[in-house]
Amino acid sequence: MQGITAISASIVAQRLASGMSQRELADRVGTAQPAVARLEQGSANPTLETLERYAEALGCEWRIELVPRAASDATVERYKVGVDRSLLRENLKRTPDERLRSLADWERSDRELRNAMRKARAK
Amino acid sequence: MTQLERLLRALHDVGVEFIVVGGVAARAHGSSRLTDVLDVSYARHPANLERIVAALKPSRPYLRGAPPGLPFEWSVPTLRAGLNFTLTTRVGAIDLLGEIVGGGTYEDLLPHTMELTVFGRAVKFLDLPWLIRVKRAAGRPKDLETIAELELLRDGFE
């Protein structure tokens, strides 16, 4: 568990999976839409009671476990330096469904490129 | 309809019990990496094996990388006799994983899944912490960039 970031990501994922808007979730929780937005952006510090209300509203329950922290991996840390964060930001603006549809679009483009290359080689 | 959509629909629509893991799950969690293969963990009880065979039969599964002509019968006994299958089909590549290094069986992974609606279907995906866990356990160099992305997505980044 990585604190508020993981909690926020979990709430966003479950809300999107339920097809709920932030306003609808806010109504169910008994709060205002901007409060939901702040929580989803990771800029809130919710109490356990608040988190319970969100779980209830989403038809979920929290599963929190304490596990030994994974040892950091120097190789992975080096790779993180090179990660294009702008691509991650763009993906995070999409729903999981949109992310997979984008992957499927790339898959289609990839097939076209392979076919074009095959045709070019055959000439 | 794309290959990924066809494969997911085929499995979902006959009620196969499966969890999306691997690169497609990474993508669903926000990774920018592309993948050619749908990796799924599947339940190995007899009814599910029958559903898997029925779901993929029209796509003519064959062992990926096997020499053409090698006898391969797509059937419940074949699935029962093996565990992990790397397959090519007419609608794309799929890996059926009866057990995953660092994650175990379908039943072991089930508590660590989340349901997402994709292509109009509710599908189980491995959650982010466990996806990182199994990718780390696999220890494949090709996963290092994906792990780096997934950990940034998990921990947050500027």
Image (spheres, coloured by chain):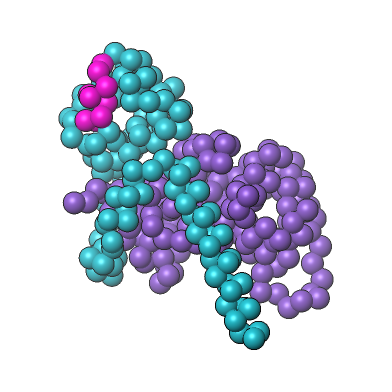
Chain colours: A cyan, B purple
Residue occupying image coordinates x 78% and y 53%: B58
- Give A41 or B95, whichever is nearer the viewer: A41
Does the magenta run of residues contain A76?
no
How many numbered circles are shown?
0
Residue occupying image coordinates x 53% and y 41%: B118
Picture coordinates of residue A16 (x, y %)?
Answer: 42, 32
Q: Is residue B106 visible?
A: no
Q: Is residue B18 visible?
A: yes
Residue B132 vs A80, above or below: the answer is above
Q: Main secondary structure of the magenta part?
A: helix
Magenta-tinted stretch: A31-39
- Give A82 or A75, whichever is nearer the viewer: A82
Picture coordinates of residue B103 (x, y %)?
Answer: 48, 52
Residue A33 vs B10, above or below: the answer is above
Residue occupying image coordinates x 49% and y 49%: A100
- Give A121 or B21, whichever is nearer the viewer: A121
In the image, is B135 to the left or to the right of B15? left
Query: Which image quarter: residue A66?
Result: top left
- Give A94 or B144, whichever is nearer the viewer: A94
In the image, is B141 to the left or to the right of A80? right
Residue occupying image coordinates x 34% and y 45%: A92
In the image, is B145 to the left or to the right of A78? right
Picture coordinates of residue A82 (x, y %)?
Answer: 26, 67
Query: Which image quarter: residue B135?
Result: bottom left
Query: Which image quarter: residue B80?
Result: bottom right
Picture coordinates of residue B154 (x, y %)?
Answer: 30, 48
Residue B60 vs A4, above or below: the answer is below
